[in-house]
Image (tube, rainbow, N blue to C red):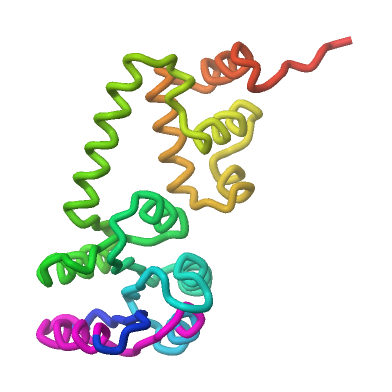
Amino acid sequence: MAKTRILLADDHTLFRQGIRTLISAEQDMEVVGEAANGGDAVERAQEFRPDVVLMDIGMPGLSSFEATRQIKKNRPETKVLFLTMYDDEDYLVEGMEVGASGYVLKDSPSAQLVAAIRDAQRGGSYLSPRMLSQLVDDFRSRIKSANRMPRFATLTSREREVLKFLAEGNSVKEIACDLNLSVKTVEAHKFNLMRKLDIHNKAQLVQYAVQKKIIKIPNLV
């Protein structure tokens, strides 16, 4: 059975050694390389061609998010899991935008990390339960707020941006390129804004954008 090849990217040597020991106990996994900063992670990913990269957030030099972006650009088949101490939703969103397959907190039980690696290798996604709980709580808060606020006010700035692009006739792929996002991320924004606005097709979306003066219909002379 082929083993899942893993690259460890973290600026703490002792932490890398601990994760290496943990992974060595799994028969279907092996650590093929290590990196102490974002730039090294990009180079090692090219050199060792791992299946999964465990990426710390906050390493010196090249940011972990830019390193992930470059790794995914060079090797789309490589999965990246952020392994971090930060239970921060902004970091989570940015990680997903650059193509990460999951977000695992460093204080998680070892079984969760192993499960996350296996999920990523199979093409799935993984969130630490605490992060998932935070997202659910945030979603519930948004629902409560939506009951008190006009629908347009519930849209995030990114959702409004995507709304404008869609109303102007741009495809999801074109929007992803213009905003430097993944197609998957734009699809998620599109789904969320149409759900919030109770819009079900392109014609309704364009009509709404015109009513809200998000776009203008050119005068015909």
Q: Where in the figure is residue 118, as x and y percent of width and height?
A: 20, 68
Q: Residue at x 41, y 32 (%)?
A: 191
- The residue sitting at 44% across, 14% down in the picture is 150
Q: Quadrant of residue 16?
A: bottom left
Q: Is residue 214 left or right of residue 18?
A: right
Front residue of 1/94: it is: 94
| Residue 105 position in % (x across, y down) | 23, 63
Q: Position of residue 214 (x, y in %)?
A: 63, 22
Q: Is residue 80 above or below residue 31?
A: above
The magenta segment is 15-40
Q: Is residue 119 left or right of residue 111?
A: right
Q: Residue at x 46, y 28 (%)?
A: 155
Residue 17 highlighted magenta (yes or no):
yes
Instruction: Name the residue nearer the viewer: 197 or 56.
Output: 56
Q: Along the horizontal axis of the image, is 206 left or right of 2?
A: right
Badge count: 0
Residue at 65% in and 16% down: 213
**Does the stretch in magenta take in 195?**
no
Relative to residue 146, is residue 213 drawn left or right? right
- Rendered-image quadrant of the C terminus: top right
